[in-house]
Every structure is written in structure tokens, then in C-alpha cells.
Image (cartoon, grey):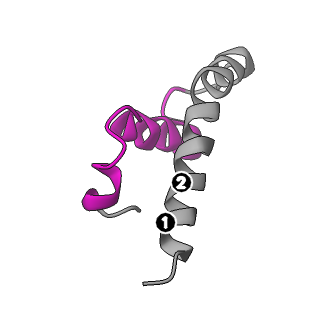
Amino acid sequence: MLPENLKSQFPDIPWREISGFRNILVHNYLGDIDPLTVQSVVERYLPALITCVKKLIAADTKPA
């Protein structure tokens, strides 16, 4: 779980939806998970999330 102060630096990332999607996948709330839906979500949202995580890592590794 990321602290709110880090998530607030990237307001374009749908943090709540990411968490909700994870819960659906892990707990299988909806029964069978449609692989095409998962693929669509990954293709649509993963690139922005990767960019965000890289920025978070880069900021965290800068000397103080």
C-alpha cells in the first residue's frame, strides 16, 4: 500500500480502481474472471502505472 502523499503526486492514476481491480482478481468476487477484460485493463492502464512507479522509484533513490 502506498502512502497517500505519494499517490497524491500522481492524480491521473486511478489508485482506487487499481485497488478494486486487484481485490476482484484476488478474491474472485465476480466468479469467473474474463481474460479479455483483464487484458483490456492491463493494456489501457498499465503503461501509465509503470511510468508512475518509475518516477516514484527515481525520486526515492535520489540522494537527500
Q: In this rendering, would 14 be left or right of 58?
A: left
Q: In this rendering, would 6 be left or right of 39?
A: left
Front position in the image: 23 or 4: 4
Pointer 1 and pointer 2: residues touching (CB < 8 Å)?
yes
Q: Which residue is mark 2?
A: 55
**Residue 49 pos. (x, y %):** 55, 40
Q: Range of the magenta residues?
A: 4-30
Give the residue type at disc 2. Lys
Q: In which quadrant of the rendered image does the N terminus lie?
A: bottom left
Is 7 included in the stretch rendered in magenta?
yes
**Residue 26 pos. (x, y %):** 57, 46
Q: Which residue is mark 1?
A: 59
Q: Residues within 10 Å of mark 2 (few under 14, many from 20)?
A: few
Q: Residue at x 57, y 64 (%)?
A: 58
Disc 2 element: helix
Q: Residue at x 42, y 44 (%)?
A: 19
Q: Residue at x 50, y 59 (%)?
A: 56
Tell me: residue 28, above or below residue 41: below
Q: Residues within 10 Å of mark 1 (few under 14, many from 20)?
A: few
Which corner quadrant of the image does residue 17 belong to? top left
Disc 1 element: helix
Q: Residue at x 53, y 54 (%)?
A: 55
Q: In this rendering, would 42 be left or right of 48?
A: right
